[in-house]
Amino acid sequence: MQKRILSYDLNDPICALATPWGTSALAVIRTSGEGSIELISKIFSKPESLKRGKGGRLYHGFLVSRETREPIDEVMIALFRAPHSYTGEDSVEIYCHGSLPGIRSILEALRSIGFRPAEPGEFTYRAFIHGKMDLTRAEAVHEIVTSKTQKAHLLALHRLEGALERTLQNIRSTLLDLQTSIEIQLDYPEEDAPAVPISSNSIQECISAIDRLLQTYREGKLYQEGVQIALAGRTNVGKSSLFNRFLREERSIVSEIHGTTRDYIEATVSIGGIPVKLYDTAGLRTALDPIEAEGVKRSLSLIESCALVLFLIDCTEPNLTEEEEGFIGRLGNRLLRVYTKIDLRKDWYNAPEAQVCPGVSALTGEGFDRLLKQIESRLKEGFHGGTEEVLIESDRQKELLERCKHALVRFQEGIDRNLPLDIVAMDIQDALQAMGELTGEITTEEMLARMFSRFCVGK
C-alpha cells in the first residue's frame, strides 16, 4: 500500500512551473501522475503522437484550448513513461515561451483537464515514495537548489549521486548481519551448533565510519549555509576600499573624510567555495555626530555575531590605542589582523608585523590573494577532505548518526560486560532504527512533512 503524508494525494496528476516566475526566453512546466500523458494529449495539437510516443523523446507542436482549439503556445514536450522518470510515474515536461500571460494560460489549461497545482516538494516526494531515491538523496536535491557556491553545488551533487546512501547502506548491511547472528542464537539456544562469535571489529568499524561522517558536519554546514565576516577598524584605514576589492566593484563609498560609512553595508562573496556574507562596518571611534554614533553602535553589535573579524590597521600608523587593544583582546580567536595601505610603506616586507600578519593594498591589489588564502585557511581549520569526500550538512542526518553511534557504543559496552544477548540486541535494533530513519526506510509523517515542505514548488 502506498503511503500518504501532508496534503499530497498520489492519485492526482500534478503540475507546476519549474522555472522562476518571471519573464524569460523559455519556461518549463512539469507534470506527473497516472494518466498525465493521456490528459495532455487532449490539449496537444498532435494527440496521437503523445499517446503512442516512446519515453525519453521530444515532441514539437502547439498547446491548444480544450474548448475553442485556439493555440495557446508553441511548445516542445518531453515524454517520460513510468517507471523511467524523475518521479517514477508517467510524466510530461512542457518547454514553452517564458511570457507570464502564456505561462498562466498553460497552467489554467492543465487545471481544466484535471491537473492540480503541486505542493512544495511533491515531485521529489513522489520520487522517494516510488523508490527512485532515498531520503539522503532527496535532501541533496534541496541542497543543490539552495547552494550558494559552486563547491556547495558539487558536494550536494555528490550526495545526489548516492555517495552518502552507499556509505550508510554499508553500515546498515553490517548491522543486519550482526542482528541476524544474534537472533539465531536467541531463537535456537539449545542447538548443538556453536554460537557465532560477535565481531567487535565490525562494530568498531561501523562506529569509526559514523565518526568520519559526523566530523564532516561542520564542513558541510559551512559550505551550504556560509559564514559572516566583518571588516572592522578605525576610520579611514581602508575598510571600504578593501570591501570593494572583495566585490570587484565600487559598492561602498570611498573617501578620505573620516566617518564616511555611517552604517554597515553587506554583500555576499565566495572564499574558497564558502559563501561569505561580508560586512563593511562603520569606523570605530567616539563620534560626536549622533547618526555616526548609532552606526558605530550597530556595527559593534554586528561584529559580535560574526565568525571572523578582519581588524584593519593602517600600516603607516600601526600603533593602536588602549581601547583598540582591548577590542582586539575581546575578539579572541575570531580576529585576523590585516595591515592595509602597504603600497605606501616601502619597507613593509621588512617590518616585524609583516612576518606574522597579512598585508594588503586595496588600491593595487598587492597581497590580496595571500589574504584570501589566509581567510580560507582560517575558515577551513579542522576540515578533512575535498570534493570527493562524503559530507553531511543536515541537522537531521547529524542527530540520527549520533543516535546510531550511541546505540552501538552501548552494544559494545554490553558485550564487554557479558550482558545477556536479548538485552544488547535492543541496542542493535535502536541503531538500525536510526539508520532506517536516515535513509527513509522508516519514516514518520512529521519528519517527512518537515523535510519536503522546505522544497520549492516544482521540485
Image: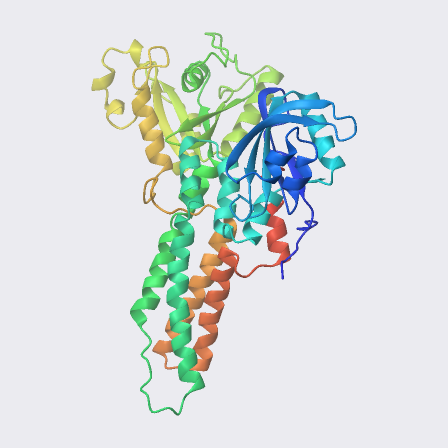
Residue sitting farthest toward the left: 350
Left/right of residue 137 with respect to residue 414 in the rendered view: right
Q: Is residue 225 above or below residue 10?
A: above
Residue toward you, 321 or 432: 432
Q: Position of residue 250 (x, y in %)?
A: 47, 11
Q: Quadrant of the N terminus?
A: bottom right
Would you place residue 95 above or below residue 156 in this image?
A: above
The front one of 325 and 130 is 130
The image position of residue 352, as x and y in percent, is 23, 23
Image quadrant where residue 411 sits? bottom left
Q: Indicate the position of residue 328 as horizontal and vertical percent values.
A: 41, 31
Position above or below: 257 against 376: above
Specify the farthest residue to the top: 256
Q: Quadrant of the C terminus?
A: top right
Visible in this render: residue 304?
Answer: yes
Task: Report the residue at 66% width, 36% height from top.
Answer: 41
Q: Is residue 454 visible?
A: no
